[in-house]
Amino acid sequence: MGTLEKGITRSGTGYGGKTWNILGQVYYPKAVTDSTFAFETNSDPGQFVPVHIHPTQDEFILVQEGVLDLKLDGVWVQAKAGDLVRMPRGIPHGYFNKSDKPARALFWVSPMAKLEALFDKLHNLQDPAEVVRISAEHEVDFLPPEAND
């Protein structure tokens, strides 16, 4: 990808005009470089990303609006607007919008590794099993469903 390009990625837009729809959630890339990858998520009530591991990336979530419930290394925690969640590589984590209101958050991972390529492949894919299979090929490993309990 190269070096970071100066500029502004406006609210509700993705870098270079790109967006992804991954199992009904809208993702907007905000900054894309080899060293970091930032994206905005918009999660309606009931939407979630199951517990998974990034073995080669540190990940962060800055909650901008609403509340996210997170399963972080086997423990349930809650992050509200303004809170920053830190998830070192190798730590199992998943996020869930269990509230009755939408949530919006800025995520970023370092380094980018294969995450942008993964999101490109998952865009508009509807089969959760295929999402899990393709994710494993891109260094994102989903845990069995009971990890979400």
Image (cartoon, grey):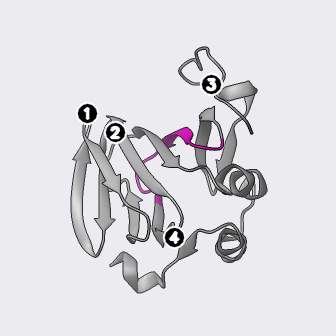
The answer to whether 41 appears left or right of 129 in the picture is left
Disc 3 target residue:
13
* Neighbourhood count class around disc 4 (C-alpha, 10 Å): few under 14, some 14–19, many 20 upward: some
Front of the two marks 2 and 4? 4
The answer to which quarter of the image holds residue 35 is top right
* Label drawn at residue 55: 4
Whether pointer 4 and pointer 1 mark residues with C-beta atoms closer than 8 Å, the reply is: no
What amino acid does circle 4 point to?
Answer: Pro
- Residue stretch rendered in magenta on the structure: 34-48
Q: Earlier in the sequence, mark 1 or mark 3?
A: 3
The quadrant the C terminus occupies is bottom left
Q: Earlier in the sequence, mark 4 or mark 3?
A: 3
Q: Earlier in the sequence, mark 2 or mark 1?
A: 2
The answer to whether 33 appears left or right of 39 in the picture is right
Front of the two marks 4 and 1? 4
The quadrant the N terminus occupies is top right
